[in-house]
């Protein structure tokens, strides 16, 4: 999609990494965005640095490192059609 081609039998031309690990052929991984430190988008080719044939480049999701402080983050959402969503994220030192 969006002008990035991939062949049917091999790896896609743009690959996805999560914390330096190859995420496979499934596309965007299901990761918790509350613990996301940053997203890196690197133009290709990146086969030398990451060991995969990333002709078009790569997208790398980098998780936030554990902190030395105890913390708790709560998130609540209310939407149409009685939609309610709650999430919690905690860190224990």
Image: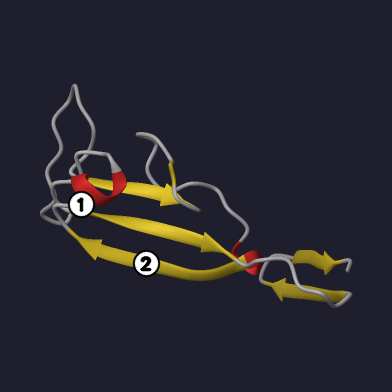
Picture residue at 17% right of the left edge, 25% below the top: 8
Tag 1 residue: 46
Residue at the far front in the pictured view: 48
80 to the left or right of 50: right
Tag 2 residue: 40
78 to the left or right of 56: right
Closer to the camera in the image, 80 or 66: 66
Residue at the far top in the pictured view: 9
Picture residue at 12% right of the left edge, 43% below the top: 5
Measuring from the top left, give residue 67's x and y in whole percent. 76, 73
Picture residue at 89% right of the left edge, 66% below the top: 92
Q: Quadrant of residue 81?
A: bottom right
The image shows residue 49, relative to residue 80, as above or below, that is above
Measuring from the top left, give residue 50's x and y in whole percent. 30, 47
The Cα–Cα distance between marks 1 and 2, rounded to whole angstroms, is 13 Å
Closer to the camera in the image, 56 or 45: 45
Label 2, residues with CA under 10 Å away: few <14, some 14-19, many ≥20: few
The image shows residue 72, relative to residue 35, as above or below, that is below
Label 1: element kind: loop
Q: Earlier in the sequence, mark 1 or mark 2?
A: 2
């Amino acid at each position: 999609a969006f002008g990035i081609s991939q062949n049917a039998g091999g790896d896609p031309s743009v690959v996805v990494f999560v914390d330096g690990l190859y995420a496979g052929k499934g596309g965007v991984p299901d990761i918790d965005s509350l613990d996301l430190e940053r997203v890196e988008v690197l133009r290709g080719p990146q086969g030398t640095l990451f060991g995969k044939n990333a002709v078009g480049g790569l997208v790398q999701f980098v998780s936030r490192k554990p902190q030395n402080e105890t913390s708790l983050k709560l998130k609540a959402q209310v939407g149409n059609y009685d939609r309610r969503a709650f999430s919690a994220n905690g860190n224990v030192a």
